[in-house]
Amino acid sequence: MAAVLTDGRRRRGERSRRAVLGEAVNLASVEGLDGVSIGTLAERTGTSKSGVAALFGSKLDLQLATIRAAREIYIASIIEPTLRAPRGIARLWNLCLTWLEYSRGRTFEGGCFFRAAAAEADSKSGPVHDALVAVDEEWIAFVERCVMLAADDLPALRDPRLLAFELIALMDAANSGSLLHGTDRAYELAEAAMRGRLLAAGADPDALSAVEP
């Protein structure tokens, strides 16, 4: 009986934790990680402050857990769909379109969680900054890998890392532009610019029209 009660409490605790983190990632995408507090999340989830504190301990632990939760959503929304496409230009173009749709579809209420968090934490130091850097390095490495795997389809490609940098910059510009202006125009421009960069690298135009995110 004690084991059953313990398992029940554990499951309820996990449900509560997921519910709080679901609110936390959206709140942080709008207000930044500094806006994620035990009190605010208790109010948004109808949980007591002591209940939220029991789940996470401190504000720092809550912020780090929020970053981990956002990373899981990012992987499910972008990385996994991208990897389902064949290696080469199909995968790289799928990555571009999938990222734009992730931002445009407001997977997080405030656009890309990691762009919002990075803008707030880039000039600071500490565990939150370090956790965001680790995720960003993973992301950059993934995009670079997708570019390198597409090299055979890009005969004019000279610098895979530079192309990856340019594609990421266009993604970020589309996200911030859409948030500021409240329109999809930035996504349309970013997609056109990405297509232009891939065509300049030698991509087959047909390969950039047949792939959907």
Image (cartoon, rainbow, N blue to C red):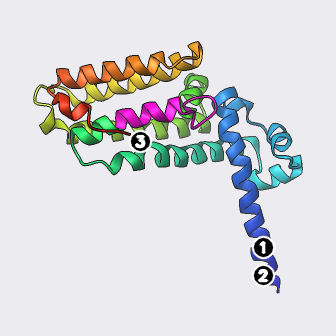
Judge from the rendering whether residue 195 lies leftward or rightward of residue 59; answer left or right.
left
The residue to which callout 3 is attached is 138
Disc 1 is placed on an element classified as helix
Disc 1 crowd rating (10 Å Cα; few below 14, some 14-19, many 20+) is few
Locate residue 111: give its quadrant. top right
Can you say whether 30 is above or below 212 in the image? above
How packed is label 3: few (under 14 Cα within 10 Å), some, or many (20 or more)? few
Residue 104 image label: none
> Amino acid under label 1?
Gly
Mark 2 sits on what residue?
4
User: Are circles 2 and 3 on residues that touch, CB within 8 Å?
Assistant: no
At 77% from the left and 50% from the top, the residue drawn is 57
Image coords of residue 106 (percent x, y): 57, 33
Region rendered in magenta: 95-112
- Residue 210 on the magenta span: no
- Of the two numbered discs 2 and 3 on the same chain, state the one appearing first in sequence: 2
Please identify the quadrant where the C terminus is shown: top left
Where residue 105 appears, as percent x and y from the top left, is: 54, 33
Residue 172 higher or lower than 88, as above or below: above
Q: Secondary structure at mark 2?
A: helix
Is tag 1's residue or tag 3's residue first in the polypeptide sequence? Answer: 1
Binning the other alpha carbons within 10 Å of mark 2 as few (below 14), some (14 to 19) or many (20 upward) gives few
> Residue at coordinates 60% horizontally, 47% vertically from top-left?
69
Quarter of the image with the N terminus in it: bottom right
Q: Quadrant of residue 110?
A: top right
- From the viewer's perspective, tell me whether residue 197 is left or right of residue 119: left
Q: Name the residue carrying label 1.
A: 8
